[in-house]
Image (cartoon, helix red, strand yellow):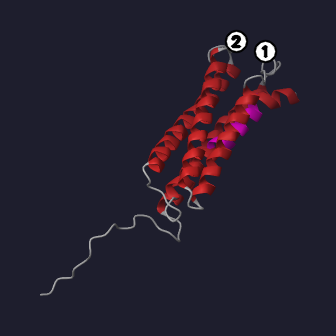
Amino acid sequence: MAESIVPLARLDVSPTDKRSSGWHGLVFMIATEAALFVYLLFSYYFLASQSAGPWPSSGAPSLAVALPSTFVLLASSGAAQWGVMGIERGRSSRLAMGLGLALALGIGFTGLQLWEWAHKTFTPATDVYGSLYFTITGVHLLHVAVGLLILAFLLVWTLMGRFTKARHEHITLGVYYWHFVDVVWLAVFTTFYLTPRLG
C-alpha cells in the first residue's frame, strides 16, 4: 500500500480570513467582565442614592492625581493602537515601540493609583463609600495588572519575531483587552471623581 508523503513544513495555527475562536472568546470574556463592573457601579449609585447626608461625607475627591493618571492610561491605549497599526503595515519595530510605550505608561498609571491609595484619608473600613472606592478601583487595578502581563508577553514575542503583517491576531486581541481596561477606567473615574461634583 502506497503511503502519502507530506512535506515537512510549519503548519499555520491561526486563521487569516475568519474570526478565530480566540476572538469570540475575548468578546465573551469582555462581556462578562463588563457585567461585573456594571454590577459594582450599580451598587455604588444605589447606595449613594440611599445616603442621608453628603456623598461622600469628606466631599468630592481631588482630581490632582486621578486626572493625570487618566490621561496616562489613555495615552497607553493610543500607543498600543499605534503599534497595532504598525504591524498591519509590516513594521514590527513600530509594534515593539508601541507595546513598550504602552507598557511603560500602564506601569506609570499603576504607580499613580497605588500612590493615591496610600494617601487617602479613608480606608475600606471607614464607611460605605470607602469600601466601594477600594473595592471597585481595586478590581480595576487587578484588570490593569492582567493587561500589563499581556502587553509584556506580546512585547517579548514581538522582539522574538513571532508576528508579521499576515499573522498578528494575538496582538490585536491583547490590545482590544487593554482598550477595554481603559474604557472601564473612564466609567470608574466618572463615577468616583466627577459625579460627586454634580450633586
Which residue is nearer to you in this view: 70 or 168?
168
Point out the frontmost of discs 2 and 1: 2
The C terminus appears in which quarter of the rendering? top right
Q: Residue at x 50, y 55 (%)?
A: 170
* Residue 148, horizontal then vertical, whole percent: 53, 38
Which residue is nearer to you in this view: 47 or 119?
119
Instruction: Tell me the kind of residue under disc 2.
Output: Thr
Q: Residue at x 60, y 29 (%)?
A: 110
Q: Residue at x 70, y 40 (%)?
A: 74
The extreme right residue here reads 199
Q: Secondary structure at mark 2?
A: loop
Q: Which residues are magenta?
A: 181-192
Q: Main secondary structure of the magenta part?
A: helix
Instruction: Tell me the kind of residue under disc 1.
Output: Ser
Circle 2 sits on which residue? 121
The extreme left residue here reads 1
Which residue is nearer to you in this view: 60 or 54?
60
